[in-house]
Image: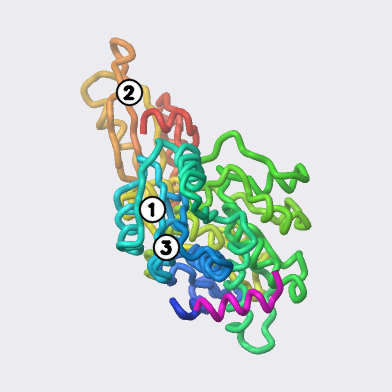
Amino acid sequence: MTKQDVENAALALREIFPATPLQLNDHLSARYGATVFLKREDLSPVRSYKIRGAFNFLRKALAAGAVGKTFVCASAGNHAQGFAFVCRHFGVPGVVFMPVTTPQQKIDKTRMFGGEFITIRLVGDIFDQCYQAARDHVDAIGGVMVPPFDHADIIEGQATVAAEIAEQLPGGVVPDLVALPVGGGGLSAGVTGYFADTLSVDRFVFCEPAGAPSLKRSLETGGVVTLDQVDNFVDGAAVARVGDLNFAALRAFAPEQVMLLPENAICLTIIDMLNVEGVVLEPAGALSITALEILGRERLEGKTVIAVVSGGNFDFERLPDVKERAMRYAGLKKYFILRMAQRPGALRDFLNLLGDEDDIARFEYLKKSARNFGSVLIGIETRHAENFPALKARFDAAGLRYQDITENEILANLVI
């Protein structure tokens, strides 16, 4: 991949959409005392950067003689939507394999983007089963598999993000830090490759969800690692194995440059950007902005920062869960299991322990654990995180037996 190749790919992309904006964000710049630019890939026609790699792959495959072939992909997310859009653009048949468990919203959007040129097949309960079915179909029909990230033409397509950034930066401005979200590594491999001769390796930070640290673990061991399990909450970046080509392009970076971001912290970013900026981000799209919050003002002040916002395909049915997780991360909501006396006035006595800014969000008797006592699950919201230490002190002074289960993932998942 050369710079000229990437710039040619970027020029070809103008057939289907203009360059996504590189926007100076006043809100984040003021928060960190920095100059923060957001590369808004959530404003592409399919609300993610994935359309770039899919377009470049099909463009080059058709030029190389794949006319008349059926193109195939396996995806339940942004890659499927980008693939579908591009198949319709080129007027070629495409088959998208999705797990049976794929939300209907994603199926409908893929069908909308692809129109008559796309066939959707629902196969298997998990992605691995779906992916194998796609590969079997390619073999059976002599089709062309379009991978989501581990291919030179995909990487080259994603690198067009960097070509646009270079053109859009104000004259003479050189970024001190570029924050890149990482799933399979196609975007990171492309962007760092394009900037290899202009930005030193220490100017990049890679942003992975804590529950899917495939790049970090691979850099730590010096070879590609397949994770035994991943947390799928950040579905656009929850990848068990970084691409082989992508890792080869990224192996010179230090493991310390990969930030593992808590899923609940990502939720806080989603809520903040929605409420303050009116920007809708999917969890993967919020990774790079979350990294800025973890780095903090002390490390960012006075610097020029670019955060690539990778996507905005957010299912609003997830909003209650995202808000819940955001409040827990911010320390504004906690869950307790209380041992409450079974007597008249016990509940009133408990309510008197709450402060003026505390509110009960959930109250549920779990079971009557003894003749005179019962176990209660209670969720409490407050306006300021510092209210909880004072509340716990009042619990202790009253002799109340309780357990804070907010950060106990196993127990919280069972009862909340």
Please state which amino acid type lies under the numbered disc 1.
Answer: Arg
In the image, which residues are magenta?
A: 1-13
Left-right relation of 387 to 248: left
Please indicate, yes or no, whether residue 349 appears anywhere in the rendered image.
yes
Q: Say which of 400 and 135 sits in front.
A: 135
* Magenta portion: prevailing SS class: helix
Q: Quadrant of residue 114?
A: bottom left
Which residue is identified by label 1? 383
The image's mark for residue 312 is 3
The residue carrying pointer 2 sits among few (fewer than 14), some (14 to 19) or many (20 or more) residues within 10 Å by Cα, namely many
Q: Say which of 292 and 224 sits in front.
A: 224
Please indicate, yes or no, whether residue 49 appears anywhere in the rendered image.
no
- Which residue is rendered at x = 75% and y = 76% of the image? 198
Please state which amino acid type lies under the numbered disc 2.
Answer: Met
Please state which amino acid type lies under the numbered disc 3.
Answer: Gly
The residue carrying pointer 1 sits among few (fewer than 14), some (14 to 19) or many (20 or more) residues within 10 Å by Cα, namely some
Compute the Cα span from label 2 to label 3: 45 Å
Q: Say which of 264 and 86 sits in front.
A: 86
The image position of residue 159, as x and y in percent, is 61, 69
Which residue is identified by label 2? 340
Left-right relation of 331 to 246: left
Asked if residue 48 is positioned above or below residue 222 in the image, the reply reads below
The image position of residue 330, as x and y in percent, is 47, 51
**Residue closest to the far left:** 344
**Do callouts 2 and 1 mark residues in contact (Cβ within 8 Å)?**
no
